[in-house]
Image: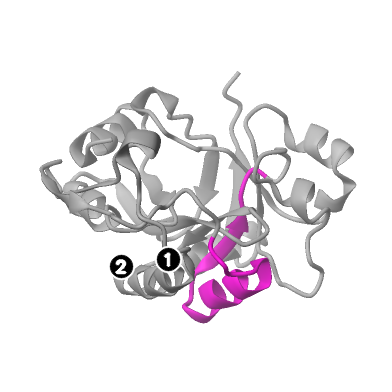
Amino acid sequence: MIPPLIVQAALDHDINLIAITDHNASENAASVIQAAEGTGLKVLPGMELQTIEEVHNLCLFDTIDQLNKLQDLVDQHLPNIKNDIGLFGEQFIVDHTGEFLGRKKQLLITSTQLSFEQAFQAVNDLGGVFIPAHVNRQAFGLFNYLGFVPPDLEIDALEISCHLTPEEATKKFPQIKGYPLIQSGDVHHLDDYLGVNQFFIEKPTIQELKLAFHSQKGRHFSILSHS
């Protein structure tokens, strides 16, 4: 997707906070942030990191510098396999207008060699927030691969897909109980925007999001109906 079109689609849906979380990649986050300057849309830099257990996790940060440090770690732990464009498609890097800058040569669709715990610790040490993604799904979901949320890790929130409510998810997966739940905003095409998570925070920062997840200091969040 092209950065200016991502920004405009969000604004058209009255969304004022998004995160860019490409799979094991981060090179396009800065371009979307730049495209959103002056628009009223806040863009958080992030990544959807796939661990060695084949679990997808949202890793969100305040700054590009934090994200770049995670990218360095991910690059070191990705298998040394070159992307085959004919089989897997392009891995473009673009500027804020959508102009071509280059290609990511290392294959991104594979798992990293980072364990779930190692990935959590790396994101936490960098000051980000680590959210296991679409935990209810068979493909790349936490419960299908690990079966539970590791109790010794302070996970701030879990993401569930848009196909079931938090109540349904908790009934089907009792291990969810007690964890704040956000709902899927997994946008692969411009018409996928849902905007289902509403945060009541003072400013769009990772610390404020964490306060909202735990209903602390007057911050909170809710999932909007999109049926």
Task: Tell me the CA gap for discs 1 and 2.
Answer: 8 Å
Is residue 218 something that shows in the picture?
no
Residue 119, disc: none
Residue 61, disc: 1
* Residue 113 falls within the magenta-colored stretch: yes
Q: Which residues are magenta?
A: 112-134
Q: Amino acid at mark 1?
A: Phe
Q: Which one is in front, 136 or 51?
A: 51
* Residue 48 falls within the magenta-colored stretch: no
User: SS at mark 2?
Assistant: helix
How many circles with numbers are drawn on the protein?
A: 2
Task: Single out the residue that lies furthest toward the top.
Answer: 227
- Residue drawn at (46%, 61%), measured in percent from left and top? 60
| Residue 192 image-quadrant placement | top left
x and y percentages locating residue 5 in the rendered image:
23, 33
Q: Crowding near pointer 1: few (<14 within 10 Å), some, many (20+)? A: many
Task: Single out the residue that lies furthest toward the bottom.
Answer: 125
**What residue did someone put label 2 on?**
64
Q: Amino acid at mark 2?
A: Ile
x and y percentages locating residue 155 in the rendered image:
68, 65
Q: Which one is in front, 191 or 197?
A: 191
x and y percentages locating residue 66 in the rendered image:
37, 73
124 sits to left or right of 146? left
Q: Crowding near pointer 2: few (<14 within 10 Å), some, many (20+)? A: some
Placement of 225 over or under 216, stated as above or below: above
Quadrant of the frame with the N terminus: top left
Quadrant of the frame with the C terminus: top right
User: SS at mark 1?
Assistant: loop
212 sits to left or right of 8? right
196 sits to left or right of 16? right
Cβ atoms under marks 1 and 2 closer than 8 Å: yes
